[in-house]
Image (tube, rainbow, N blue to C red):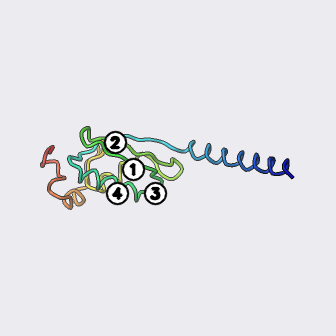
Amino acid sequence: MNKFKALLFSIVLAFMSFGVQAQQGNKETVKIKTSAVCDMCKATLEKAMAYEKGVKSSSLDVKSKVLTVVFDSRKTNAANIAKAVTETGYDADDKPAQERAYNRLDDCCKKEAGDH
């Protein structure tokens, strides 16, 4: 009976390790230079990324204005993430923010507000 339990445990452990390995193989990271200027921008962008399909995590470094996004490459890609950033009202690398979304941003989050 103990040998059976040990065998069963080994099989379950093997399947679990394959599952973890498969999940890690689909993770990609993209860094996007944004036009974010404050902590409110950080909260807005990170919240928007949380709603994007396939995004695992995101973090904006306000000082460097770089948004780092970890995503599942089976569900999305870097271009879709950059598009989501522009649709939130911020520039994404060389892509300008969508005007309508930019106009909805709080005044402190607009490029003209400058660093603060």
Considering the numbered disc 4 on the image, is that residue within a helix, a strand or a loop? helix
Q: Which mark is residue 81?
A: 1
Q: Which residue type does callout 2 highlight?
A: Ile
Q: What residue is disc 3 on?
A: 53
* Residue in the image at 25% along x and 59% along y: 101
In the image, is 69 to the left or to the right of 34? right
Considering the numbered disc 2 on the image, is that residue within a helix, a strand or a loop? strand
Q: What residue is disc 2 on?
A: 32
Callout 1 crowding tier (Cα within 10 Å): few <14, some 14–19, many ≥20: many
- Alpha carbon distance from label 1 to label 4: 13 Å
Q: Are marks 1 and 2 in contact (CB under 8 Å)?
A: yes
**Which quadrant of the structure image shows residue 62?**
top left
Q: Are marks 2 and 4 in contact (CB under 8 Å)?
A: no
- Alpha carbon distance from label 1 to label 2: 9 Å
x, y percent for residue 42: 28, 50
* Residue in the image at 58% along x and 47% along y: 23
Q: Which residue type does callout 4 highlight?
A: Lys
